[in-house]
Amino acid sequence: MAGTKLNWTGVIPAATTQFDTGLAVDFDATQRVLDALINDGVDGLIALGTVGENNSLEPEEKRAVLKAAVEVTAGRVPVITGVSEMTTPRAVQYARDAEALGVDALMVLPAMVYVPNAEELEAHFRAVAAATALPVMLYNNPTMYRISLSNSDLKRLSDVKNIVAIKESAQDSRRITDIINELGDRYAVMVGLDDLALEGLVLGATGWVSGLTNAFPEESVALVKAVADGDLARAVAIYRWFMPLLHLDAVSDLVQSIKLAEEIMGKGSERVRMPRLPLSGDRRKEVIAMVEKAAATRPVGTGKAVKLV
């Protein structure tokens, strides 16, 4: 059964979707990115999350990306897909299609654009979960999606057996403790903001859904391992080195920044689809300088920055 090997631990990158020079999906390049992440030791993959530009792809492209992800992963790690649709019926159909394509779990977002009330948010999550036997991770990101998933919401949803985890991306590490205090181990809690990763893991998050792992996977894996081993000094050292880059995960141009970092590290292309545009001007220079400095002082990995023309 799909999903049986997924225990919501370790580092699970929200992987990028690669595009060719005409901005068509480059399936070969996307598979290379996924394969490299697995070889670098990640514990799972999220296809078509925010960093995977889910909402910039056409419906048939999304299904094709999932097929390619399942194919290249070949059962080595679980594949999770973001469920990010404009309406609940579309989200339900996507969940069904993802299951049929062999995905291991779903990361379910609120319906896009419309800001629901608590009753509507609950109904959306229940409908998507009911459409599949796959395990579901809810995604709470109040800054991005303008709706906060509260502990009261989680309690009401606790009877839905296949809703098993939450990606917590509120910009307040106290949320991790509040969830665990009120709901115990009912949900696996994944820390979802890169620049709260260490705090979240120390406070009881079972794992980390990461963006910057796309550019620096070895350090990401080492950070999570250090926490698991109880080596807090090593974890803090890696985290302090990483923090300038981790802040890129919490800004509006996170996708462009992460893909630029990925290209500098020789792991992918910075090409994005509109309405996003590649970084330019002072912002581009700033991010390049940050990545080059990080590459020159890596505490774990050996790859060097590629000078961009």
Image (spheres, helix red, strand yellow):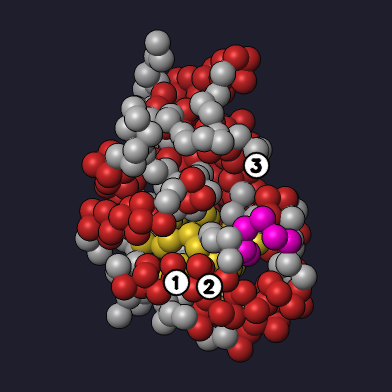
Q: Amino acid at mark 1?
A: Gln
Q: Is the Cβ of the residue at disc 3 closer than 8 Å to that at disc 1? A: no
Q: Residue at x 72, y 50 (%)?
A: 143
Dot 3: what SS?
Answer: helix
Find disc 3 in the rendering and name its residue: 250
For the residues labelled 3 and 2, the Cα–Cα distance comes to: 30 Å
User: With 185 as the anchor, is 10 left or right in this view?
Assistant: left
Which is nearer the N-term, disc 3 or disc 1? 1
Q: Mark 1 = which residue?
A: 93
- Decide if residue 287 is on the left or right side of residue 16: right
Magenta range: 109-115
Q: Residue at x 66, y 38 (%)?
A: 251
- Callout 2: few (<14), some (14-19), or many (20+) C-alpha neighbours within 10 Å? some
Q: Position of residue 52 (x, y in %)?
A: 45, 47
Visible residue check, residue 233: no
Residue 89, numbered label? 2
Q: Are marks 2 and 1 in contact (CB under 8 Å)?
A: yes
Q: Nearest the camera: 165 or 227?
A: 165
